[in-house]
Amino acid sequence: MTNVFDVLIVGGGPVGACAGALLARESSNSRAPMRVCIIEPKRPKMPAVDSPLEPRVVAISRASERVLNSAGAWSRLTGPRIEAYERMRIWHESTPPSKALVFDAAEVGEPNLGYIIENRLLQAALLDEFTAAGGHLEVADFQQLHVGADAVSVATSAGTLSAKLVIGADGARSAVRESVGLTASVSDFNETAIVATVVTERSHEKTAWQRFMRNGTLAFLPLADGTSSIVWSADNSLAAGLVAMPAADFNTELTRASDLALGSTRLVSERFTFPLQRIGAHRYVTQRCALIGDAAHVVHPLAGQGVNLGLLDAATIAQLVLEARAEREDPGALRVLRPYERWRKSEVAFMSTAIDAFDRFLAHGTGPVSRLAQRGLGWVNNSQELKRMFVNRALGVAGELPRAAR
């Protein structure tokens, strides 16, 4: 096996695996398919059909569904482990659940508003498609890289590889970003996300439920087996207490925080936590290197847009690299990479600003602007035009889209 590639992707999570699958699949019919490698320390296996669903899930938008279909992975995902959600119900603690802002797929002529999919299932499907399309998966740890005039040399625990272009898809603490000297703004939300699977007294009704509170945001994401995955983004002090509680006490607090929207709740998994940070790379590219996904940007999880933004990054960089190759251009040249940075940085900035505003004024605000934002939920509820605008953003079909997402 050669250790020289056209593109080398560090990180085989859903975003990096998607970029690899798109590049390998789209070039596989050409006379000289691209040599694409993904470095990933551990390859996950597809979960058994009858195994319990995992708490760590992602919400996949319509645009992401199209990208995954273009990458060849969607057919590997459809089945009993994914759940399409048809509605979203969003309300503030100052109003009862019956007064929630409701987005319904039927009202906007869509079959659903998206899908809830286990992270491991998504990653495994994309890596399987990547290797099926001729990509090379290097099961190894990334160690360091050196950018030369004509190629990048990458040292791994299994040996040294080289490529014309390195794509950093190695997460929020990106070693690639640090290695090439790309800096980032990092700030804490002073919140912790608690993730778990719960059983609810009432059916989730294929609905994503979200309540904004003065000390955080609580979301219930519907799962295919009738349970729900919760994402409780709580202020750090509150989260610490919630995690330390016995399960029975946590169940009581969760039921109270949900305002009985789904009746009583009960944990059926462990509680997992992760601190919430806002990260924005000042630059997404440098000579022979581009950042995608969390390596480039991390947003608050309240809108479920993190993976969706990353999949659009993957589709965009893949499109531009393939176009450059068709023109016999060097895929690592800045003239190829800068359009990616301009394209995605502006789209991510718009979404990040909107999400931060929701967190600031709906989840934590108490002043007049916050009260105005809370009343705004009702105004949106009474306007089909505003609803459609928000739904299109949630579906990911607004803005400038790469071909794979159209």
Image (spheres, rainbow, N blue to C red):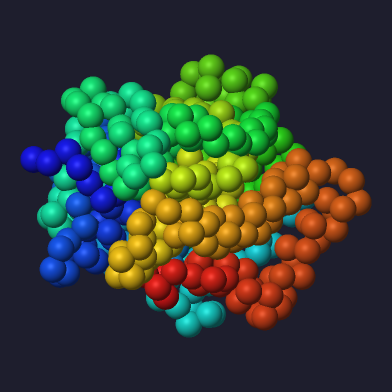
Position in image of residue 15 (x %, y %): 37, 49
Q: Nearer the viewer, residue 326 or 275?
A: 326
Residue at the outermost left position: 1
Is residue 115 in view? no
- The residue located at (24%, 66%) in the rendering is 26
Q: How many marks?
A: 0
Position in image of residue 16 (x %, y %): 34, 47
- The residue located at (64%, 54%) in the rendering is 349
Left or right, 16 with reference to 241: left
Rendered view: 52 above or below 33? above
Residue at the outermost front position: 149
Q: Nearer the viewer, residue 327 or 50?
A: 327
Rendered view: 329 above or below 246? below
Position in image of residue 154 (x %, y %): 30, 32
Quadrant in the picture for residue 271 = top left
Position in image of residue 196 (x %, y %): 43, 35
Rendered view: 123 above or below 378? above
Left or right, 363 with reference to 140: right
- The residue located at (52%, 57%) in the rendering is 338
Q: Nearer the viewer, residue 300 or 2?
A: 2
Q: Quadrant of the C terminus?
A: bottom left
Q: Quadrant of the N terminus?
A: top left
- The residue located at (41%, 46%) in the rendering is 288
Is residue 26 in view? yes
Quadrant in the picture for residue 224 = bottom left
